[in-house]
Structure formats: C-alpha cells, structure tokens
Amino acid sequence: MWTLGIDIAKRRHNATLLDAEGKVVFRNFSFAHSHQGVNGFAAKLAATGQSPAGILIGMEATGHYWMVLFQHLT
C-alpha cells in the first residue's frame, strides 16, 4: 500500500507520496486550491501508475478547504 499525506491550506495544498517500501515518489508537491490545481494533482497521481485503491490517503480536515479535494479523490 502506498501512502499519501496532504497538508491542506487556504490557497495551496502540499502532498507527499511514499511507495509501499517507504521510498519517496514525490515530496512537497504544491498545488492550488482550485479545480485546475486539483485536476493537475490528480494527473500527477495517475502518472505514477499506482491504482487509486492501492493508495492510503491522510489529509488534515482544515475548515472547509479539504472538501473540494476530498470530493475529487473519492
């Protein structure tokens, strides 16, 4: 199982993805809190080739800022 940690913020989110062995796939990838930013982030995830079912996601539920990203990822 891969692990994705996302730090949620008002304008930009930061994400780090680790593979099943704990090796960094990408670190501190910053993307805008917008549909364009979330779509770009989803494309970056898809480019890894990992199935979405194989990624455990943890994100900070800050205010309402996490909702757009959560809806897109689910």
Image (tube, helix red, strand yellow):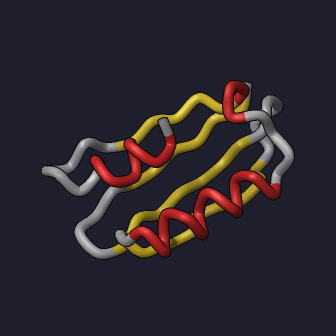
Residue 38's x, y, as percent? 49, 63
Residue ID at (45%, 36%)? 58
Residue ID at (60%, 69%)? 40
Please state, as top left, top right, bottom left or bottom right, where the N terminus lies in the image. Answer: top right
Q: Is residue 70 above or below residue 55?
A: below
Residue ID at (41%, 65%)? 13
35 vs 40, left or right, is left
63 vs 37, left or right, is left
Residue 56's x, y, as percent? 59, 29
Residue ID at (77%, 34%)? 51
Residue 11's x, y, as percent? 29, 75
Q: Is residue 56 above or below residue 10?
A: above
**Near-viewer residue (19 or 66):** 66
Residue 27's x, y, as percent? 64, 61
Count of numbered circles on the image: 0
Q: Is residue 34 above or below residue 8?
A: below
**Near-viewer residue (23 or 66):** 66
